Image (cartoon, grey):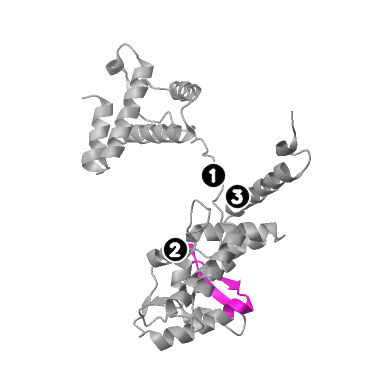
Amino acid sequence: MDAAGQFIDYLIYELNRAPLTATAYANDLRQFKEWLSPNNPESVDFTAITQSDVRAWLASLSKKGITPRSLRRKIICLRSFFKWMIKTGKINSSPLHNISLPKLPKPLPELIKPQEIEEALFKINSDSSQDESPDEMLNSLVLEILYSLGLRRAELAAINDKDISFEKGEIKVTGKRSKQRVVPVPQKLMQQISCWQKMRDKTQQKQDPDNPLLTIKGKRITHHQIYAIVRKSLAESTAKKKSPHALRHSFASAMLNGGAEIDSVREFLGHASLSTTQIYTHVSLSEIKKAYTHSHPRGEKNIKG
């Protein structure tokens, strides 16, 4: 068995990698060998591979139209393989040492139109009777908080009563890696939260000592339940993705389109890096381009011939 075969066995039997991963790596190594020696792939001596060989192979794949994502996987495969070669004493250094992964294009986030969010909220409220039910009040509050504050669903689920300051009009949010931030809350939303708490305490028997803000039958709301509420509430939206994260995207886009500074939006969203927030500037620009194309006399839609 050659080095490639030994490496695949190592992945399967020692690292317990998934069969699909092992198969993909085996195919990548086979393709590399066939490129190096088309007439006799099994004669390839992996100890003699140079960085130039690797770069030439990747360049040939790129010319064939291989996607950046596929190129990344092949580089990761070779990195792992030559790292194993060093570990087993077959080589002293890896030919992948200075070869970086190609960057993947970042897809623009899916947005839900503000008008459609407002319509969904209006429908929830109009469908209820004068005495709003706990379910309707919860559904409305979930949608309001996600869109008004741009929270992740995990952040929403984690809010406890003690995190809310009615006096200051603020909520303390616990984000990724337990990093906390304080977000301002509109007075109308604060009133809605207060009304919900009264309804919750009147109709549900408390089962969680942490006093979570949002509960169903006395238990903290789950991520799945939040997702289900959003998806059902936005059923009539034209957006492809009707999710809590789409509402977060819509919040960020609305803030930037409304003139908010990008650093303020970053703080609001709890992003560690400004580059993460900058994707929303591209969303805003795409909306501007779309408006120009359809509205200006010299826009593409209005130019004939």
Instruction: Residue 69: give its label.
Output: none
Percent from the top left, x then y, of residue 249? 56, 57
Residue 89 visible in the picture: no
Kind of residue sitting beneath label 1: Pro
| Side of 256 relative to 195 (left or right) | right
Residue tagged 1: 107
Considering depth in this image, is 230 or 35 the residue closer to the camera?
A: 230
Q: Does 176 lie within the magenta span?
A: yes
Residue 255 appears anywhere in the view: yes
Query: What residue is pinned by disc 3?
Result: 279
Q: Residue at the location (58% across, 79% down)?
A: 190
**Badge 1, how many Cα within 10 Å: few under 14, some, many 20+?**
few
Looking at this view, name the residue that lies furthest to the top. Answer: 39
Q: Earlier in the sequence, mark 1 or mark 2?
A: 1
Looking at the image, residue 56 lies above or below residue 110: above
Q: Is residue 8 left or right of residue 298?
A: left
Q: CA distance from mark 1 to mark 2?
A: 25 Å
Left or right: where 59 falls relative to 304: left
Q: Secondary structure at mark 3?
A: helix
